[in-house]
Image: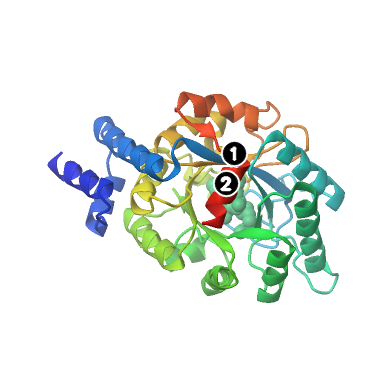
């Protein structure tokens, strides 16, 4: 316990914790020790964000993808997943309904859909147009998660109103990356984020756990996230998907994701850290918030025919992944949705 006391004391007093100490925290298994870690994460969250939580609306507008990621339900070669591509009109209407429901940001996400990621059929122009129209209609901050796009396109997306670029490396262990993101360049993916930063976009970086990663990988990822200067950092447990190579890996215990969220709060106390509804739905929200997360992501309107990424249907029709669905959980945690003005203030500073 003495070791834990010392580490938590350092975190609370703005003294950087060492990589050895990060390893120690990530490995905690005893309930009492973990609870102390989470309590410290909550103190730090309160210091920077009070009791305010940001809410992100999620519009997964195309599930077509040119990639074959071994963890992903929507990989190109999975014939059995739900494929759809919403029209521009539908996307704008869905975003508007989300805005009216009280979210603070619209996350426009797609598979690496060849129809959009193409110059020949004006796919990129259409993507830019979608961002412009969603901005005009909602006047909300926008995050785009389109996968890797060329520099000039990223610039246009920013000009059209995209504030954030989310593009998760999943891991910073290159060998593991090659087993997850088949035939995708690690360096190109990384460079896209560096470029987004240089043009003044905010960047979200993420890691996937339970995919054959180890503690050392997480330690390395924290270092890379710091180098990148990501303003939002996340971790999600791998959710096994039928019809994919990693399906057999089986469900993982989420304790490691929860530890990682808390350690992220200690390492990046003033950054945004999501509690995703896309891993365990509404039932998993409290423990993620209790571990120090301060953003709820993957808020999805019930009747729009939209899917989640890792939980394609969980809690969507039931309406739990909505602002009224998550608010009681926030209250249970002693938290409250921020106002839009508070989110805008955070973005501006
Ligand atoms: N297609 C874009 C890309 O690859 O950047 C954006 C969307 S991608 C589907 C969003 C993220 O969802 C992935 O980067 C990964 O972290 C997460 N994800 C996908 N499948 C998952 C799964 N089975 N379990 C947990 N997370 C998953
Ligand atoms: C989420 N399913 O926030 C979404 C997704 C993409 N920017 C976000 C992973 O959980």
Q: Where is 328 relative to 196, above or below?
A: above
Query: Tag 1: Cα neighbours inside 10 Å, few (<14), some, or many (≥20)?
Result: some
Report if the CB atoms under discs 2 and 1 are less than 8 Å apart. Answer: yes
Image coloring type: rainbow
Regarding residue 320, the answer to whether it shows in the image is no
Q: Is mark 1 within 8 Å of ligand 2?
A: no
Q: Where is 154 relative to 231, above or below?
A: below
> In this view of the protein, which residue sits in the foreground, 162 or 85?
162
Which residue occupies 74% across, 55% down?
64
**Can you identify the residue that label 1 sits on?**
339
Q: Where is 160 relative to 55, above or below?
A: below
Quadrant that contains the N terminus: top left
Helix, strand or loop at label 1? It is loop
In the image, residue 162 lies at what x, y percent?
A: 68, 59
**Quadrant in which residue 4 is drawn:** top left
Which residue occupies 26% across, 57% down?
16
Q: Is residue 330 left or right of residue 310?
A: left
> In this view of the protein, which residue sits in the foreground, 181 or 112?
112
Which residue occupies 86% across, 49% down?
89
**Looking at this rendering, what residue extends furthest in the left direction?**
2
Helix, strand or loop at label 2? It is helix
**Quadrant in which residue 161 is drawn:** bottom right
In the image, residue 215 lies at what x, y percent?
A: 33, 53
Q: Is residue 278 left or right of residue 89?
A: left
Query: Tag 2: Cα neighbours inside 10 Å, few (<14), some, or many (≥20)?
Result: some
Distance (Cα) linking label 2 and label 1: 7 Å
In the image, residue 248 lies at what x, y percent?
A: 51, 45
**Can you identify the residue that label 2 sits on?**
343
Q: Is residue 101 left or right of residue 44?
A: right
């Amino acid at each position: 316990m003495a070791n834990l006391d010392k580490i938590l004391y350092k975190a609370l007093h703005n003294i950087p914790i060492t990589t050895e100490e990060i390893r120690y925290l990530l490995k905690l298994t005893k309930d009492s020790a973990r609870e102390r870690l989470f309590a410290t994460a909550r103190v730090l969250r309160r210091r920077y964000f009070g009791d305010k939580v940001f809410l992100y609306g999620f519009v997964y507008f195309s599930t077509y993808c040119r990639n074959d990621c071994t963890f992903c339900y929507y990989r190109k070669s999975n014939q059995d997943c739900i494929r759809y591509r919403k029209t521009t009109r539908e996307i704008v209407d869905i975003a508007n309904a989300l805005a009216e429901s009280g979210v603070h940001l619209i996350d426009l996400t797609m598979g690496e859909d060849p129809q959009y990621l193409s110059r020949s059929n004006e796919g990129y122009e259409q993507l830019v147009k979608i961002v412009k129209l969603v901005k005009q209609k909602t006047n909300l901050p926008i995050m785009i998660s389109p996968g890797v796009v060329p520099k000039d396109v990223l610039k246009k997306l920013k000009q059209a109103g995209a504030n954030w670029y989310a593009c998760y490396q999943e891991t910073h262990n290159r060998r593991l990356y090659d087993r997850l993101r088949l035939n995708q360049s690690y360096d190109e993916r990384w460079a896209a984020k560096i470029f987004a930063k240089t043009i003044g976009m905010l960047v979200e970086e993420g890691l996937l756990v339970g995919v054959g990663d180890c503690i050392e990988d997480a330690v390395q990822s924290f270092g890379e996230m710091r180098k990148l200067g990501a303003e939002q950092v996340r971790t999600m447990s791998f959710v096994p998907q039928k019809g994919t190579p990693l399906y057999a890996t089986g469900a993982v215990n989420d304790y490691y994701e929860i530890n990682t969220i808390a350690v992220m709060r200690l390492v990046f106390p003033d950054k945004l850290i999501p509690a995703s509804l896309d891993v365990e739905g509404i039932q998993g929200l409290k423990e993620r918030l209790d571990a120090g997360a301060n953003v709820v992501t993957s808020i999805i309107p019930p009747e729009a025919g939209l899917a989640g990424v890792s939980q394609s249907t969980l809690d969507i029709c039931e309406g739990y992944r909505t602002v009224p669905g998550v608010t009681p959980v926030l209250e249970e945690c002693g938290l409250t949705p921020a106002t839009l003005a508070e989110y805008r203030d955070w973005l501006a500073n």
